[in-house]
Amino acid sequence: MRAEVYGLLKDEKGSAHLLLFGLLGMMTAAFIWVIAFNWMMQTYGMNKTKPLLDRAAHAASLDIVAEEAALGRLVWDSKKGTDDFNRYLQLNLKLDSDLAPEKGSHLREAPVVHHLEFVTSPAYPYVLQRTVTVHTGTAKQTTRSVQVTIYGPSVVAIVELNQPLLGLSRSEPVVLSSVASVRFR
């Protein structure tokens, strides 16, 4: 019996190589699938969060001082605008008062608001550049540059979200920017 099995294996030429190449191909396909799935989940999260961030920035941009507007000047009430931004961010993203996700939120970690600026410039269009450092002081420290073009007095918000990654114990920081311009047409 042993000689017959050995004889059958001896006559097979290349089947072990085919098996190894097949396994290598399946491992490669699984690796590509995990990377594609992580990319799709990150894109889905950004596409779902970006309009909600835009609405919060727009809410902040509406808080102008009425007395100054009556005189033809655009002056923001930055305290009220910041409060409205945070309130809309909490309501739209289903966050509690500490910006931690509540039940039903599509976020898994609290967003970090790096910049909320009320920007005016003597001339438009104006290119605003900011640098954001995420995970400061850790081995995962990353610097992201944000460049936006504004076409009138604007509110600019720069927020960091952390997207979990499938198959990894870490999450990937995603930096989103939102510009809400006040343009009179």
Image (cartoon, rainbow, N blue to C red):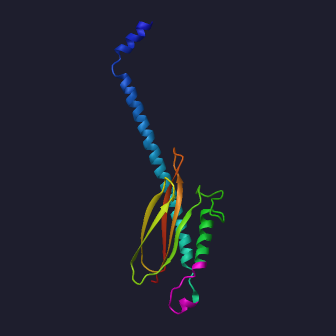
Q: For the view shown, which residue lies furthest in the bottom direction? A: 71
Magenta span includes 112? no
Q: For the view shown, which residue lies furthest in the left direction? A: 13
Image x and y of residue 79, in percent: 60, 78
Q: In the shown orientation, is residue 110 left or right of residue 26? A: right
Residue drawn at x 51%, y 75% as measured from the top left: 117
Residue drawn at x 60%, y 63% as measured from the top left: 93
Image x and y of residue 83, in percent: 61, 74
Q: Quadrant of the C terminus?
A: bottom left
Magenta segment, which residues?
A: 67-79
Residue 50 to residue 79: above or below: above
Number of numbered callouts drawn: 0
Q: Which quadrant would residue 65 be assigned to in this image?
A: bottom right
Magenta span includes 77? yes
Residue 101 to residue 72: above or below: above
Image x and y of residue 26, in percent: 43, 35
Residue drawn at x 36%, y 14% as measured from the top left: 10
Residue 103 to residue 184: above or below: above
Q: For the view shown, which residue lies furthest in the front direction? A: 137
Residue drawn at x 60%, y 65% as measured from the top left: 92
Residue 109 to residue 26: above or below: below
Q: In the shown orientation, is residue 44 left or right of residue 3? A: right
Q: Quadrant of the N terminus?
A: top left
Image x and y of residue 18, in percent: 37, 26
